[in-house]
């Protein structure tokens, strides 16, 4: 009986130890470990499901990053070889898409939407998926297609064995990552959109029809828990109209089945209560309130209702559509929430038609990934009239906050402002304003926005500069006499743009890292109104204008600057990445700047030799080698987005550490004489110490959850107790 009791106790103890081991290996499911992928893979545009532009690799470090050398390259073909594959398209050359790496295979997309697969170790081309599309026929079928013909592509995402491309002409395309075959392409996603008809394009050179859709934005991501793919469609970016919407697809069906659609703007016929329906869930940023009162956001419930009624007016004109989703989404698998940023409402040149504040343009939005229901929203740029959109990647992270770990969202606007949001509520925890872009104070003592022009569109000087509108000011939102017809007065277009730049988050150092330009300084004299597609009289030349770039490293828990690195007279577009204490920042001068993540000091500059417009990526080859991958070939027509110059075919370049590393430098250090006093004698000792140059040794430490420690402790106690009982029973 006693032996039986002991056996039972021992079985319980062993079971608890096995449970602890299981919890240790499987802890934090759908947490930060899930989002951060493995060391080997870079499977989304910005690295992982949380869009952090971070890799956990440990091979490349501050001590050896200066040794990176070109392993191999692949030149992209000239556009002349496209032939008839893109009927009716004005194909742009090259690629500005960050490559992906999955299980030793590298995938990269060109601006034509061709997808290449390479063996990352050898450079062998495995397959090509060539994109063939008759754009002329597509436009005849659906006149909602318009604007840019092909444009550039912002990248690929990988989920469940499929590569997802950006949504050219309202299509959803999935390519088998193993074979390169197109698994499916779902078209006609923008046909018969409710509320998208009846747009008045009478100022567009005679075109009358539905609002135009297109935008080659970022690919969708998959909410893996429910196998729902989420993609943004339509909207406006240049001078198109049309309703933007987000759509969820059930991937358990072939072809995928639409399960929800959520619109980001009201229908063409208007909706006076549009801004009121989800008011309780949202926040506005007010620059005047931030500067004068230190407020990081104003709850929508505080905004006077008369400033929200008839938010968009009756948007039957070209300047009324929210731009498409910009940047990679971030998905919280645990809570089932998708986060994304939106662009400006349409028509860069002149958006004086619209009352405001124009929800949900220039915003970060959180939706239920399963249903599409609004969770919260935060509008960064109220009534944006100068394309100060909430661009690029929406970064999710976990940071220390008041003694706890908090999930947060990080967002950079082209205004040069960074927000840190509470992922649960949308509240801004801190706001960082790039010091080199702070607003000016004019000679009359009035603070105005970051523009060098003199606004003359009338009225209240406090709200003159486009993106510093105040949602609390009724006059600013509703009372301007020039509303409902486009202003023909002098108007500032893009008074400053801080660049199009993806942000990185370093979870090892709790740092937000962002490259912010001094601005693409240009003015726009609007009058007389020139219609759709016209950026009338731009007085700044992107390509020739000297711009500076500053890379900021910001403490994620405080918003304080840890360090900054200044690049003189160099424009920036693309983004930065970080890994193992090293920051990589490609710039328009053709160099990848390699910085120490702890100090911001320059380690090295990789000379690529052509202007760079996309962030690099990091991946691991089949043999376990970490490599840096950089695309080049700007892919812009005409001269110059952000000083980057004209289009170029470009190539993809792979950098790795040498196969044979240099011998570490041996330093002989003579230590001062030590005197050791013992009883009745004195001994003089000289020590010679040989010290190698610091080479960090990485030790893989498996993370054990606190619960596991508790279980193991209980197990030990039970073993002791059972042993005592056993001995007593023997006696």
Image (tube, rainbow, N blue to C red):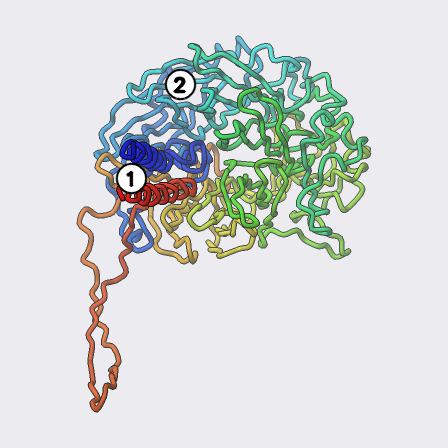
Residue 150 appears in view: no
Along the polypeptide, which appears first: circle 2 or circle 1?
2
Q: Find residue 327 and report its horizontal and vertical position in percent.
A: 50, 33
**Helix, strand or loop status at disc 2:** strand
Give residue 174's mark.
2
Question: Residue at left 50%, top 31%?
Answer: 332
Give the vertical position of 388 relative to 149 (above or below): below
Question: Residue at left 72%, top 35%?
Answer: 300
Q: Nearer the viewer, residue 215 or 105?
A: 105
Question: Residue at left 74%, top 27%?
Answer: 276
Residue 631 appears left or right of 52:
left
Residue 457 appears left or right of 717:
right
Give the vertical position of 355 relative to 511 (above or below): above
- The quadrant holding residue 102 is top left
Q: Find residue 217 and report its horizontal and vertical position in percent.
A: 50, 27
Q: CA distance from mark 2 to mark 1?
A: 26 Å
Q: Nearer the viewer, residue 448 or 393?
A: 393
- The quadrant holding residue 435 is bottom right
Q: Nearer the viewer, residue 615 or 452?
A: 615
- The quadrant holding residue 100 is top left
Give the vertical position of 31 relative to 590 (above or below): above
Q: Nearer the viewer, residue 218 or 339?
A: 339
Give residue 654's mark.
1
Q: Find residue 54 and report its horizontal and vertical position in percent.
A: 41, 42
> Hey, which residue is sitting farthest bottom in the picture?
680
Task: Determine contact: label 2, label 1, CB under 8 Å.
Answer: no
């Amino acid at each position: 009986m006693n032996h039986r009791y002991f056996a039972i106790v021992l079985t319980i103890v062993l079971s608890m130890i096995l449970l602890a081991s299981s919890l240790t290996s499987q802890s934090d499911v759908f947490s930060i470990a899930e989002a951060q992928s493995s060391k080997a893979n870079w499977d989304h545009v910005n690295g992982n499901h949380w869009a952090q532009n971070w890799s956990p690799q440990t091979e490349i470090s501050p001590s050896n990053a200066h040794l990176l050398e070109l392993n191999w390259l692949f030149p992209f073909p000239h556009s002349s070889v496209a032939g008839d594959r893109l009927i009716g398209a004005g194909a742009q050359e090259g690629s500005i898409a960050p490559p992906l790496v999955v299980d030793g295979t590298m995938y990269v997309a060109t601006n034509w939407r061709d997808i290449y697969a390479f063996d990352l170790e050898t450079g062998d081309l495995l397959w090509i998926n060539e994109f063939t599309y008759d754009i002329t026929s597509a436009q005849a079928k659906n006149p909602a297609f318009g604007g840019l013909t092909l444009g550039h592509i912002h990248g690929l995402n990988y989920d469940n064995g499929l590569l997802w491309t950006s949504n050219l002409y309202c299509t959803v395309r999935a390519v088998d990552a193993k074979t390169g075959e197109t698994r499916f392409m779902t078209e006609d996603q923008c046909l018969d959109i409710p509320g998208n008809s009846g747009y008045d394009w009478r100022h567009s050179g005679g075109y009358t029809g539905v609002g135009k859709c297109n935008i080659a934005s970022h690919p969708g991501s998959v909410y893996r828990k429910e196998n729902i793919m989420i993609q943004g469609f339509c909207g406006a970016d240049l001078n198109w109209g049309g309703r933007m919407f987000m759509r969820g697809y059930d991937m358990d069906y072939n072809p995928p089945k639409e399960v929800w659609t959520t619109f980001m703007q009201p229908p063409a016929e208007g909706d006076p209560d549009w801004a009121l329906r989800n008011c309780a869930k949202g926040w506005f940023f007010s620059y005047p309130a931030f500067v004068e009162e230190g407020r990081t956001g104003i709850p929508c419930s505080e905004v006077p209702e008369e400033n929200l009624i008839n938010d968009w007016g009756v948007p039957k004109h070209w300047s009324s559509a929210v731009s498409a989703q910009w940047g990679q989404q971030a998905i919280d698998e645990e809570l089932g929430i998708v986060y994304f940023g939106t662009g400006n409402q349409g028509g860069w040149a002149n958006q004086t038609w619209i009352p405001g504040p124009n929800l949900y343009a220039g915003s970060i939005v959180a939706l239920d990934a399963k249903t599409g229901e609004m969770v919260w929203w935060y509008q960064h740029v109220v009534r944006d009239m100068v394309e100060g959109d909430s661009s690029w990647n929406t970064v999710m992270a976990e940071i220390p906050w008041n003694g706890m770990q908090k999930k947060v969202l990080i967002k950079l606007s082209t205004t040069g402002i960074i927000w840190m949001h509470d992922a649960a509520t949308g509240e801004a925890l801190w706001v960082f304003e790039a010091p080199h872009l702070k607003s000016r104070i004019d000679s009359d003592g009035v603070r105005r926005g970051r523009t060098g022009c003199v606004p003359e569109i009338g009225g209240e000087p406090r709200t003159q500069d486009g993106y510093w509108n105040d949602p609390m000011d009724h006059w600013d939102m509703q009372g301007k006499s020039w509303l409902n017809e486009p202003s023909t007065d002098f108007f500032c277009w893009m008074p400053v743009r801080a660049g199009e730049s993806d942000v990185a988050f370093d979870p090892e150092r709790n740092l937000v890292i962002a490259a912010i330009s001094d601005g693409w300084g240009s003015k726009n004299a609007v009058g007389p109104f020139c219609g759709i597609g016209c950026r009338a009289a731009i007085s700044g030349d992107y390509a020739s204008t000297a711009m500076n770039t500053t890379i900021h490293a910001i403490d994620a828990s405080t918003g304080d600057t840890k360090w900054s690195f200044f690049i003189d007279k160099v424009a920036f577009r693309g983004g930065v990445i970080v890994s193992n204490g090293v920051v990589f920042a490609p710039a328009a001068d053709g160099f990848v700047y390699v910085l120490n993540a702890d100090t911001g000091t320059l380690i090295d500059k990789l000379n690529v030799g052509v202007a760079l417009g996309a962030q690099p990526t990091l991946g691991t080859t089949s043999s376990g080698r970490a490599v840096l991958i950089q695309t080049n070939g700007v892919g812009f027509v005409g001269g110059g987005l952000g000083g980057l110059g004209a289009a170029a075919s470009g190539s993809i370049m792979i950098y790795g550490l040498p196969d044979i590393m240099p011998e570490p430098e041996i330093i002989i250090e003579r230590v001062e004489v030590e005197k050791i006093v013992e009883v009745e004698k004195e001994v003089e000792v000289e020590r010679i110490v040989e010290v190698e140059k610091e080479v960090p040794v990485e030790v893989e430490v498996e993370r054990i959850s606190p619960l596991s420690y508790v279980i193991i402790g209980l197990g030990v106690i039970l073993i002791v107790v059972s042993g005592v009982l056993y001995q007593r029973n023997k006696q």
